[in-house]
Image: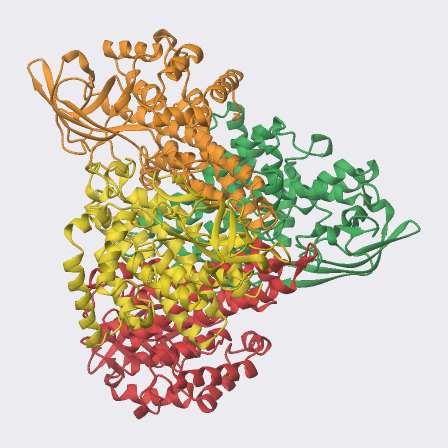
Chain colours: A red, B green, C yellow, D orange
C-alpha cells in the first residue's frame, strides 16, 4: 500500500491551501491574534460555508463529508502550515471525535451545530494533579434526583473561551485512576456554577482553567455513561493527537522552508549565510526531522483510518517523535534566524511557539514514550513494518 | 571544589547575607521573582543599583581607585554566589561591566573623572550600540557613519538589538570614520547622551512579548570629538577589548546551579506517572543528574582554565569563548527541562503576572509563572553577544589553530 | 504499516520460510551467527550465493530477462524480511547490486552476455575500484591513469578500501583517460580480471582486526578496450549511476529492526541494578523505545518518499541520501547500545570465536560474541559509500537548493 | 585554591612524558602489543628503576614517594597520552590502593614487591551476574580449619594474565548485595584450583575470567576481614576510577590533537579538510569535551586528595562525564579520520578502542549517573562549587 494521497485528498489539500494563502496571510493572522476574541468568526463561517471543512470528519448522515483520519491529516497539515488560530482541532477533531461516538440524541444535535458553524467545543478533561493522564480524574458527578451535580476543577482546557459547549469528564465512582465510573457530560459554559479563568497560551491560542461548583447536569446532557466513556475518550484523544502531529508536520515544513529562505537572503561576511556549511548541515538535519515527522504523522493517521490493532501505539510513537522534532527543529530555526528569530516580528517565532506548545499538548514526548512502551508489551510484533 | 574558606571569607559571607536579609526586602523579592527577562526591568534595576551603590558594592570588579570595594577574587565570588542564591535582580552590565573597562583603559583623565562616578551612582544608565541591521556576526561591516565637522562628529545610521535603550541616558557605539583599508581599520568608539537631537528609539518586541531591545536611529547626531574613546579609526581594538568582557564576566557555575535548584523545586511539586513526584521519576532524574554534572564540568573547567590563563598558555585565550558557548547552551538545556517539567502549565501566557507592573495572579502554581518566559527569552543567549556559531569559529582559530 | 498482505503474498512468505528452513542449515546458521564483518567472509558468501543461485533467488532486483525471479516489489520485501529475520549471511553486493545495473544500462550486448550470467552464478566475484589514497570524498580527483595502447588501456595507479579484493576475481574501476577540462570530464569505467599481470593486493586490517578491505595496485596492467562500460571519458556519468545503487538498495527498516531484536534479547538476559533485567530498567527502556521509534520513522519515511519519487517531485532525488545518512547513523546507535548492554563482557576481544575459521568458545555469554566487533566495524558505515558529511552536502544541494 | 600543578607534579609529568616519547612511540608500542606477553618487562623495569613511578602512590616508609591522588592523576594522564599497555593501573593504583589500606603484614610485603618492580597485581572482584556492582558477590570463602577455602567465578579481571598475585573479594557470610561478610584474600594465580581463561580486551590489554575451585587460603593471606574490607574496596575503586578518568583525559587530548593534525594534512576538494566549517565545529566540540573531562578528572583527584566528604560523588560525576566524552570524542575522531580511522594502521583507532574500554571499565556512564544521584541525596549541598 502506498502513502500517496487520493485524488480527493489532493483536491481537499489544494482548496484549503489556496483559501489560506488568499485569506490567512501572516499579516491577516496577526490582526486576528492581536484582536479580540483571538479568532475570526468570519474565517470560521468560511470554513463552514465556503470550504465545508467543519463537517470533514462526520458521517454524511450528520451533514458531514464522511472523512477519516487521513482527511483530518490533510486538513491539519494545511492549518498548521498557515498557523490557523481558529478552534478546528478543539471543535471538529476532539469535540467532534467524542460526539460522533456518543449515542445520546444531544450528541447528534451538537454535531449538526458544528457542521453548520455555530457550535464550538472544548473538551475539559485535564486536571491540575494529572500531568498528562486523562484518567486521573477527581471531578465528581453526584446524582441528585434524575440530574447530576458536577463539582471539580479542570486545567488548561484548550478552546474553552471560544466554546459554546463544554464536554466534561467526571466521575460517578471509582478511584483516581480507575476507568470505571467515568462519564462524559455536556455543559453550557454560561450555566450557573461554571467559572472560567480565560487566558491565551504561549502560542496565542485560547484556553481556560475551569471551576465547576455544583453545576446541575440534566439527564439528557449525559453524553456517555461509564460503560463506554473511557473507550470514547481514548479514541478521540488518539485522533486529536494524530491531528496535532499532522499540524506539526505542516509547521515543521514551514520552519524549514522559512529558514532556508532567510539564510539565502541574509548576508554576513560578504556571502549569504546559507553558504556556510555548518548552517547547511543544520538545515539538512531540520529537513530530515521534518520529513520523518510527516511520515510518522502519516503512519498514525493511516493506522487510525484502518482501525489497526496497533493504532494507539502508532499514535504514541508518532507523538513522541514529532514532539521532539518540534523542539529541535524549532530551536534550530530560531538560532539560524539569529536575532530576528527571537522577535515577534517574523513568522518564525510564531511557528516556533506553536511547535513548542504542540510538544506538550496531549502529552509530552516522555509521556508518549512511556505509553509506547506499555502498548508495545501488548503487541505481538515489534517490527517497524 | 569545596573550597575550604578561611574564617575571613566566612565572616564576609555572613556580612553579605546580613546585607541581603536587610535590603533585599520581601517587596523587592516578590517583584524580582516575577521577572523573566534577561535583565530586571528599568525601575527595578535602578532601585537595586542604588541600594548596592549606597553600600559601596555596586562594582565588585572595579579597582578601589575608581570606587570598587577592594575585594579578593574569592570575596567577589562569594558575593556573586549569595546574590544568585537570594535571587537578586539581574542588573544590566552595559555600563559597569562593559563600558567601564574601556573607559579605564582608553579614556582620558577627564573622561574617567566624568563618566566613572556617574556610572557608579547609576546617574548614567548605559546602552550598547554595536550591531546594525546588516552587521550582526560580521560586526566589522558596520555602516553607521561619523563625519568630522569641527569639534564634533556627525553620526548617521542605525543600531539594533540595543538592550534597554528605552531606559538608558547614555549610549556607547561603534561608528565608521573611514572607508579606507580593511573594514576593521576605519572604526571609532564614541559615547553620546541618548537625548542628543537626532536620536530616536524604536521598540522591538520579543517573542515572549517583552520589550527589552530596540532599534536606535541616528539622524545627523552631533557627538563631540571629546566623547571618543581611543584614537580615531582604532575603535576596533577598543571594541574587541570590550567583547572579552561581554563573553567573560563572572563564573557560570553559580547562576546555572541556582537555575537547577529552581528546577528541582518544580520537580518536587509536580505530579508524575508511577512516582510520588516528577523528582522521583527515574528518567527525569537521569536528565537532571546529567545537567548537574554538566554544570560541574563547566564550573571546574572555568577554574582550571583560569590557572592556565595566568600562565599565559594559549588555551587561556579561548577560555572566554568556551565559557560563553557552554554556559549559554547549558542554560538553554536547563530552561528547556524546567519548562517541560511544568506539564500543561507550561502553556499559559503568564504576561499578566510578569514584570514590575503586573497585577494578575499566576495561572496554575506560583512556580509556573516564569519558566516559559525564561525559556523563550533564553533563546537569545546563543545568539546575542557573539552567537554559538561565532564562538565555535573563534575556538577553532584560537584553540585549535584552524 | 501493517500491510494487509494478500493471500498470494502469504503463500510466497511460506515458500521463502520453507526454503530457508531447508537450506539455511544449522551448520550455516552457526557459522553466520559468528560473523561480525560488514559482509560474510568469502567462503561463506560463496556457499550461500550458490544456494540462492540454484533456487533462482540470487538477484531479486534483476529483470527476468537476465535471470531475475520476476517478483513484485512486495515479494522482494518479503524475501528481504525473511532473510533478515533468519539471519542469513550478508552477501557482498559489488557485483549483483552495483556493477550489474551499470552493465545492464551501459554494457554492450557482448558484455551483458559474458558478465551477467557469471555474476549470477557466482563464478565472477566482484570488487569495486573507486576510492584512491588521495581521492575519497572527492572522488573526481582520482589519479589512476589508463593510457590507450592499441586495443588495450595500460592502467597504473592504486585503489584503496577495496572490499573483498582478496576473494574477488573481477574488479570494476574508475580511471583517468584524460586530464583535459574538469576533473569529472576525463574519467572512464573499466572492468578487469584480478589475475591480470600487474595487479597486486595489500591487505588493510580494520581496527577490529578483520581483513575486509585492501589496497589494490595497478602496475601497467593491460585492460582491453572491450572491457570499458560506456564511452571513453564519460565514466563519471556511469559512476554516479552506480552510486545511486550504493546509497539506495533495499529497505532499512527490516535490518535495523532485526538489530533491535538482537538487542532486546541481550537486554532480557543481562542483569541490572534494581530491576529483574536490563530490559526492565526504565532508563534503558526509554533509550530502546527511542531507537524503536527512530527505526519506524525511517522505514515510514522511505515508504513515503518512494511515492514522491514516483511522482517525480524533486524530493525524491534526495531519498537515497536521506536513507544512507539515517540508516547508517541509526545503525551505529543500535550497535552502540548493544555493546553497552553487555556490561563488562563488551570488553573481551572475541576474535578467536569469530569468523568461519574460529574454533574458540565465546568469552562470557554466547550473545556477547558479536556486538563489540559489530560496533567497531559499524564505524565505517558513516564513512564508506559517501560519508555522512557528503550525504548532508548532497541533501543541502538537492533537497534544500543550497 | 587553584587547579595548578605543584612544581613537583610538573617535574613528574615532564620526566614521565619525556621517557614515554623517547621509549614508547606508537611503533614501539605496536611491537609490545603484537608480541607476547602483551606488555614489556623492560619498560616495567624502567618504571621501577629509572622513573621510580611504581612507588608513586605508596608511603615513604614502604619505599614509595608518598604521592596522593593528584600525583596519580598526573601519571595516568601521561600514561594515557602514550597509551601505555603495562599494568600500572591494575598493580599500583588498584592493587596498591587496596594493599596500602590493609593492616596485614603480607600487604606491606607485597607493596615492597610492587615498588621494586617484581610484583604485579590484579583485583578479581567483578562477577558475571553483577554488571557493575562490586558488592554483588557470590564467591564463597568457607572456613576449613585455620584456613579458608575459596570457590567461585570472577569475570573480566583486568591484568590477571600478567599478575603475580591476585586480590580476590569473597564472602564468608551475608547475602548477595550485603556489605557484611565480605573479605579480601591474596591468591597465587598458580595455586591449585585457580584456573584462568586469559584473553585480550578490545583495547589490546590483558584480562581473564577466573575460576576458583576450592582454593586453599592460609590465614596470613586474608588481607582484610569483613569489618574493613567494604570500605577498603570502595576507597580503592574510587581511586582507580579517578585514575582512569585521568588516563582518559590524556587520551582525549591526543584524540583531539591527532584529529586536528590529520585534518590539516588531508586534502580533498583542493583544500585541507580542516578548512571545512562542519569539521572545524565538530573539532571544537571535541575540544570542549576534552577540556571538561580534564577538569572533571582534576576535580575528582582533588576531592580524593583532600579526603572531601563528597569524594565518591565527585568520582561518580567525573566518570559519568568522562565516559560519555570518551564515546563522543572517540567517535568524532574516527569519523574525521575517514576511512583511515577505521583501520589498525593509525594511532587514532587504538586510542579510540581504549577510550571505549574506559567508558565501561569500573562502570558505565549510566552506572555512575545512578551512583551520583544516590550519593547526592546524602549530600547537604548540591551546588557546583
Camera-nearest residue between C4 and C311: C311
Which image quarter: residue A57?
bottom left
Q: Of residues B346 and C238, which is closer to you in this image?
A: C238
- For residue C93, side relative to residue A279 (left or right): left
Q: C161 left or right of D158? A: right
In the rendered view, tell whether residue A299 sits above or below residue B163: below
In this picture, residue C189 sits left or right of residue C82 = right
- Image coordinates of residue C19 in percent, x first then y, are 17, 63
> Is C361 on the left or on the right of B61, as rendered?
left
Q: How many marks?
A: 0
- Give the answer, above or below, for where A139 lies relative to D180: below
Determine if residue A189 is in view. Answer: no
Q: Is residue B179 visible?
A: yes
**What residue lies at 83% left-to-right and 41% top-to-bottom?**
B231
- Indicate the quadrant where residue D314 lies: top left
Relative to A77, residue B184 above or below = above
Residue B143 position, x and y percent, is 77, 56
Q: Position of residue C362 (x, y in %)?
A: 21, 38
Going by the picture, which residue comes out furthest to the right?
B150
Considering every residue shown, the one lying at the far left of the view is: D145
Residue sitting nearer the eye, C305 or B116: C305
> Could you tell me residue D232's position as x and y percent?
27, 22
Residue D180 found in image quarter? top left
Amino acid at each position: 500500500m502506498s502513502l500517496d494521497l487520493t485524488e480527493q485528498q489532493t483536491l481537499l489539500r489544494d482548496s484549503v491551501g489556496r483559501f489560506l494563502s488568499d485569506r490567512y496571510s501572516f499579516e491577516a493572522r496577526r490582526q486576528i491574534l492581536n484582536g479580540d476574541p483571538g479568532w475570526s468568526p468570519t474565517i470560521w463561517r468560511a470554513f463552514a460555508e465556503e470550504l465545508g471543512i467543519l463537517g470533514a470528519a462526520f458521517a454524511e448522515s450528520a451533514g458531514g463529508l464522511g472523512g477519516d483520519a487521513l482527511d483530518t491529516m490533510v486538513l491539519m497539515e494545511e492549518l498548521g502550515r498557515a498557523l490557523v488560530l481558529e478552534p478546528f482541532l478543539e471543535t471538529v477533531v476532539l469535540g467532534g471525535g467524542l460526539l460522533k461516538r456518543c449515542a445520546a440524541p444531544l450528541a447528534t444535535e451538537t454535531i449538526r451545530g458544528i457542521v453548520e458553524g455555530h457550535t464550538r467545543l472544548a473538551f475539559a478533561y485535564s486536571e491540575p494533579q494529572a500531568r498528562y493522564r486523562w484518567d486521573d480524574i477527581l471531578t465528581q458527578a453526584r446524582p441528585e434526583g434524575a440530574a447530576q451535580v458536577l463539582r471539580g476543577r479542570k486545567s488548561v482546557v484548550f478552546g474553552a473561551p471560544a466554546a459554546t459547549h463544554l464536554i466534561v469528564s467526571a466521575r460517578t465512582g471509582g478511584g483516581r485512576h480507575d476507568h470505571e465510573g467515568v462519564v462524559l457530560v455536556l455543559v453550557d459554559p454560561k450555566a450557573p456554577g461554571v467559572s472560567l479563568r480565560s487566558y491565551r497560551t504561549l502560542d496565542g491560542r485560547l484556553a481556560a482553567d475551569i471551576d465547576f461548583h455544583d453545576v446541575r447536569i440534566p439527564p439528557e446532557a449525559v453524553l456517555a455513561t461509564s460503560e463506554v466513556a473511557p473507550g470514547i475518550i481514548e479514541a478521540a484523544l488518539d485522533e486529536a493527537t494524530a491531528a496535532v502531529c499532522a499540524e506539526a508536520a505542516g509547521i515543521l515544513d514551514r520552519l524549514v522552508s522559512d529558514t532556508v529562505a532567510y539564510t539565502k537572503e541574509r548576508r554576513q561576511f560578504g556571502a549569504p549565510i546559507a553558504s556556510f556549511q555548518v548552517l547547511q548541515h543544520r538545515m539538512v538535519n531540520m529537513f530530515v526531522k521534518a520529513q520523518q515527522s510527516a511520515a510518522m504523522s502519516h503512519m498514525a493517521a493511516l493506522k487510525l483510518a484502518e482501525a489497526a490493532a496497533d493504532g494507539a501505539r502508532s499514535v504514541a510513537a508518532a507523538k513522541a517523535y514529532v514532539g521532539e522534532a518540534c523542539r529541535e527543529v524549532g530551536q534550530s530555526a530560531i538560532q539560524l534566524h539569529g536575532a530576528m528569530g527571537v522577535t515577534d516580528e517574523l513568522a518564525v517565532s510564531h511557528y516556533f511557539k506553536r511547535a513548542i506548545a504542540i510538544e506538550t499538548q496531549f502529552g509530552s514526548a516522555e509521556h508518549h514514550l512511556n505509553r509506547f512502551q506499555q502498548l508495545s508489551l501488548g503487541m505481538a510484533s515489534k517490527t517497524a513494518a | 571544589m569545596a573550597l575550604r574558606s578561611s574564617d575571613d571569607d566566612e565572616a564576609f559571607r555572613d556580612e553579605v547575607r546580613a546585607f541581603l536579609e536587610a535590603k533585599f526586602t520581601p517587596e523587592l523579592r516578590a517583584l524580582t521573582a516575577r521577572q523573566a527577562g534577561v535583565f530586571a526591568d528599568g525601575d527595578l534595576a535602578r532601585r537595586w543599583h542604588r541600594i548596592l551603590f549606597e553600600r559601596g558594592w555596586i562594582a565588585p570588579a572595579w579597582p578601589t581607585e575608581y570606587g570598587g570595594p577592594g575585594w579578593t577574587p574569592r570575596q567577589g565570588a562569594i558575593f556573586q554566589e549569595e546574590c544568585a542564591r537570594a535571587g537578586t535582580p539581574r542588573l544590566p552590565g552595559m555600563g559597569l561591566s562593559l563600558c567601564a573597562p574601556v573607559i579605564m583603559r582608553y579614556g582620558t583623565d577627564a573622561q574617567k573623572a566624568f563618566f566613572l562616578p556617574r556610572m557608579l551612582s547609576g546617574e548614567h544608565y548605559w546602552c550598547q550600540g554595536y550591531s546594525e541591521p546588516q552587521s550582526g556576526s560580521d560586526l566589522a561591516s558596520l555602516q553607521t557613519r561619523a563625519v568630522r565637522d569641527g569639534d564634533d562628529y556627525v553620526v548617521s545610521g542605525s543600531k539594533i538589538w540595543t538592550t534597554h535603550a528605552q531606559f538608558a541616558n547614555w549610549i556607547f557605539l561603534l561608528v565608521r570614520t573611514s572607508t579606507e583599508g580593511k573594514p576593521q581599520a576605519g572604526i571609532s568608539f564614541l559615547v553620546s547622551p541618548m537625548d542628543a537631537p537626532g536620536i530616536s528609539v524604536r521598540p522591538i518586541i520579543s517573542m515572549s512579548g517583552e520589550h527589552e531591545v530596540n532599534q536606535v536611529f541616528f539622524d545627523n547626531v552631533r557627538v563631540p570629538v571629546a566623547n571618543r574613546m581611543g584614537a580615531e579609526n582604532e575603535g576596533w581594538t577598543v571594541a574587541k577589548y570590550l567583547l572579552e568582557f561581554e563573553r567573560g564576566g563572572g563564573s557560570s557555575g553559580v547562576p546555572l546551579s541556582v537555575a537547577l535548584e529552581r528546577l528541582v523545586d518544580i520537580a518536587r511539586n509536580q505530579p508524575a506517572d508511577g512516582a510520588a513526584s516528577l523528582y522521583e521519576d527515574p528518567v527525569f532524574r537521569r536528565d537532571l543528574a546529567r545537567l548537574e554534572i554538566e554544570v560541574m564540568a563547566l564550573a571546574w573547567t572555568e577554574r582550571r582554565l583560569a590557572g592556565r590563563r595566568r600562565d599565559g598558555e594559549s588555551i587561556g585565550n579561548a577560555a572566554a569563548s568556551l565559557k560563553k558557548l557552554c554556559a549559554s547552551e547549558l542554560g538553554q538545556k536547563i530552561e528547556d527541562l524546567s519548562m517541560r517539567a511544568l506539564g500543561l502549565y507550561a502553556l499559559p501566557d503568564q504576561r499578566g503576572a510578569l514584570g514590575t507592573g503586573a497585577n494578575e495572579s499566576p495561572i496554575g502554581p506560583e512556580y509556573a509563572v516564569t519558566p516559559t518566559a525564561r525559556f523563550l527569552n533564553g533563546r537569545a543567549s546563543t545568539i546575542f553577544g557573539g552567537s554559538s556559531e561565532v564562538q565555535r569559529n573563534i575556538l577553532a582559530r584560537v584553540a585549535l589553530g584552524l
